[in-house]
Image (cartoon, rainbow, N blue to C red):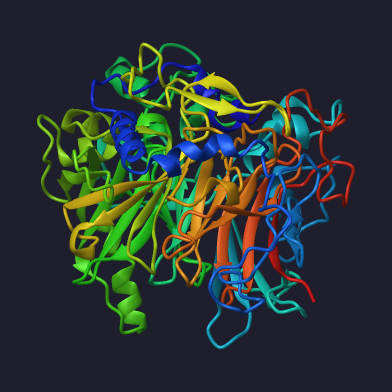
Amino acid sequence: MTCLFRCGNACDHPEPNPTTNDHIQDEIAKAVQRRSLLKGAAVGSGALVLGSLTGGLADQAVASSGSGKRDLATAAFTPVRPNKRDAVTTATGFTYDVIIRWGDPVVAGAPTFDPYAQTAEAARTQFGYNNDYVGVLPLKGSKEALLVVNHEYTDENLMFPANTYTPAEIKTAAMANYGVSVVQIKPGLVPGSWRQVKPSSKTTYNRRIHLETTFAFDGPAAGDDRLKTTADPAGIQVKGTLNNCAGGTTPWGTVLSGEENFNSYFDKSGALDPRYTAEYQRYGITGSGKGWMEVDPRFDLTVEPHEPHRFGWIVEIDPMQPGSTPRKHTMLGRFKHEGANISLTKNGRAVAYMGDDERGDYIYKFVSAAKFDDRGTSKARAHNKTLLTKGTLYAAKFSGDGSEDGVYDGTGEWIPLCNDTQSFVPDMSVADVLLFTRLAADKMSPTKMDRPEDVEPNPVNGKVYAALTNNSNRGTVAMPVDEANPLASSMVRSAIGAPLTSASGNRNGYVLEITPDSGNHGSRTFTWDLFLVCGDPAAAETYFGGFAKSAVSPISCPDNVTFDSEGNLWIATDGNVLGSNDGLFRVPTSGPDRGQVLQFVTMPRGAETCGPLIADSNRSLFFAVQHPGEIDGATFEQQASTWPHTDDFPRPSVCVAFKDR
């Protein structure tokens, strides 16, 4: 169900990247082969661990350096065991609160949520469905903060009671559940806890951004003919944002949101425009959508062939200015953006790291032309909000370096695609590159990745971590691997305690660690290391940063990541194929515990972990529980989950975990 509703079963279709560009799998195979020779004990010790969490790990608290019991970066905790509970399960000694649920009021005057009385008008004032990215921005001069949350997609099977709505009513109400929510929150009584401020005339920052909200295009492609539609003949404005997945908070206090699987929302009433055959194909746009053209003609490709070109961008929202117009940055390219995360070069330019979440697609970065102004004035902030409109867009190429020292597993370079005035791709203009970035990158031969999702810089060690979720088609004719490639197949479990069995492809994913040369995010070159080869520690192919496999939690399908103030990596998973529910894990990136994966939270049945964020001096762990109960065959009348157990149906929600009293 998740694959159907979120991305239109993308993995059941041929890989949309038909090029012969190198796959990351080939470089990973070399890396793992070298590592197995150099560090054989670390890679090959999986057979010593017979269960998912047996032996010395599960029954003892594991501490990293430090002693603050409320500090999630250093606190000791007993890892949560894999489980199939219909609950959020935190490590012993910690607890969690639900801050806001699907349907809860966001805007003052919003009606009380009633699943039998859903309307588009009500949904545009309430918390949307399937919360993903979570950002928290402190309010100056106050203990309160703004919670900013994406709403990625809808599952009408779970949302709407049967025999209650017409098809058109379902479509319009579902469409209104997309977008972004901005919600004022305040600290709770227990340190690290937070709760929503009740919407009123005083919650002036609260806002629901939805498919009727006006967005402005900026950057070099704004106004291009291929962005023009009947409703927007100038090609500079668009209604709404779609399929918003991950995101990031900028150093200047705005939020970036990635439009991801936008391709599956467009229908056709007749033939498709032959001018865009190659472009549609490369982006997976077929005209088989969700039937929205029945209630909004702009989603009919036959009528509006340019409308899909208006989605697939990085969106910037200013939560501190609730009346401001959100923007879509054409300079950051158009593809299935997981999100965007900002760091600064040594000379102060803004760098945005981005992943294109599709099998066989690429990792990108953007470097601004202008420099960040750190003076903190309103004039400086206004300048900083223009940084993503001019600069240079790059795609990453990873190469095995043949080194036998076991320190770095490869080298890489950032291949320039265009800047705001010049294209570096043959026979393509700047606007061509930005509108059809996938096709432009194909020509420059970057490395094809296994579903690059979150790509985030670590503010402590300066490295960049990329979650490569999985690729079940690895090892097929279309995605060949050499004999040395240990992940042409992966070990999976059908249930907790079931034996490991072999499955085709890369089923559990990896985490790549990228080190910019000279520690400068503006550098054109880098080294890279395979930080994690995910899976059950009992599987021989797994690798945990060199840490002993007898003392790690199993982890499958890394998706979103974040960091605490110690530089620990926190990993949220999506699609566990080891028999357990998804979860959230803490992993040190340096020191003697580097690579020690420890599970801190598990999700309810059918749910994905999203939007992890460490805040409030490491006392608060925010996370989103997305699509609880989304299990094949589930309906509103026959739910597979009722989490958070406030109703007889599931409600996606944003939570915060903290040390119990």
Q: Please tell me which residue is depicted at 70% across the width and 79% down the height of the picture.
A: 191
Image quadrant in which you'd find residue 316:
bottom left
In the image shown, does 373 or 404 lie closer to the viewer?
A: 404
Residue 419 locus on image (x, y percent): 16, 50
Check the image and report above or below for 535 versus 344. Answer: above
Q: Please tell me which residue is depicted at 37% across the width and 34% down the height of the picture.
A: 309
In the image shown, does 445 or 495 lie closer to the viewer?
A: 495
Q: Is residue 542 visible?
A: yes
Residue 571 locus on image (x, y percent): 54, 52
Residue 382 locus on image (x, y percent): 33, 73
Image quadrant in which you'd find residue 535:
top right
Quarter of the figure that contains the N terminus: top right
Quarter of the figure that contains the C terminus: bottom right
Residue 177 locus on image (x, y percent): 65, 45
Horizontal side of 516 relative to 569 (left or right) equals left
Count up the numbered dots.
Answer: 0
In the image shown, does 271 or 261 lie closer to the viewer?
A: 261
Horizontal side of 155 relative to 312 (left or right) equals right
Q: Please tell me which residue is depicted at 34% across the width and 67% down the height of the picture.
A: 385
Image quadrant in which you'd find residue 171:
top right
Q: Is residue 536 visible?
A: no
